[in-house]
Image (cartoon, grey):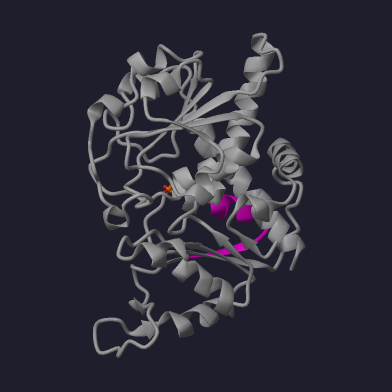
Amino acid sequence: MKVFQHVSDIGDLKVAMQEAFDIKQDRFKYQTLGKNKTALLIFFNNSLRTRLSTQKAAMNLGMNVIVLDVNQGAWKLETERGVVMDGDKSEHLLEAIPVMGSYCDIIGVRSFARFENRQDDYEEKILNQFIKYSGRPVFFMESATVHPLQAFADLITIEEYWKKRSEETNTNGKKPKVVLSWAPHPKALPQAVPNSFAEWMNAADVDFVVTHPEGYELDPQFVGNARVEYDQMKAFEGADFIYAKNWSCPGVTRPEDYGKVLLKDMSWTVDTRHMAVTNNAFFMHCLPVRRNMIVSDDVIESPTSIVIPEAANREISAQVVLKRMLEAL
Ligand code: CP
């Protein structure tokens, strides 16, 4: 694997899932695979889970790891070609990328949506330059439009908990009903997590529903054939998994609204009233989460909240991806 961006990059999803469960059984099974190989993790934005889980996954594989926080100690980078660099940016990405590539074997990059220009964000202008100029395999650690390490971990978590639920109760071989729900947030957040979650759920064996207020339609390339339901309570009826997440306006129907917060309707905050109409659903969120904006204290602290094991599975998804990239070097 040379690039990890979309669910299609992982190949046969069933095979990848089995590999994830095998690694979870014995995460040090491939501890010599990464000997004398270096992973460079580049962060243009903050992180807790991605930073720690990806480092841990690389260490499980015996790799060396370098972490670069671009905004703390590195030269300020210009990203646009043709700019007269007479401002505060001292280095151009076009030199910085191949230099960074020369110090490592695999590169992971986090670079969020900038919300300045929808086309630039949706064309993945920054990450594509890493793919083009680094000379190294590149995996996305949340880009302008996708967060595949998160979605892979989410799917691992759903399969694990659905298997447990099926063993405890008679689910009659039914597919789990998985609902992705928009929830309010005070700031404009990217669409990367819901985009990838939708893309991966469409590829998985689940009954997938997306619910959000009108105007928050996700890009069709990600939402695919998912059922969209504008009535949140109706969407939650009989759900087995609730995945809450805020996203700013994707600008699908009104491009001028791209990246805007159109409403903060607190009736969309996931609380016990919502969960009561589900099929005792598991509650998921990628974290970090703003309590009592996205989800009530009661729901996130309930026995069916699986946000912590979901975050723990980030180590597993990262390890599968790094293993595949090491094997292809
Ligand atoms: N879920 C996630 O990617 O967390 P971080 O932003 O803390 O890495």
* Callout count: 0
Residue 135's place in the image compared with 206, above or below, is below
- Residue 29: x %, y % from top left: 76, 46
Residue occupying the far front of the picture: 253
Residue at horizontal 51%, vertical 74%? 129
Q: Quadrant of residue 61?
A: bottom right
Residue at horizontal 75%, vertical 64%? 328
- Residue 198: x %, y % from top left: 52, 41
Residue at horizontal 45%, vertical 55%? 145
Residue 322 shown left or right of residue 128 in the figure: right
Report if residue 57 lies within the magenta region: yes
Residue 132 shown left or right of residue 260 in the figure: right
Residue 271's place in the image compared with 15, above or below, is above
Residue 190 visible, this orientation: yes
- Residue 77: x %, y % from top left: 36, 77
- Residue 160: x %, y % from top left: 64, 28
Residue 42's place in the image compared with 265, above or below, is below
Which range of residues does the magenta coloring cover? Answer: 53-67
- Of residue 158 and residue 33, the one placed in the foreground of this image is 158
- Of residue 60 and residue 256, the one placed in the foreground of this image is 256
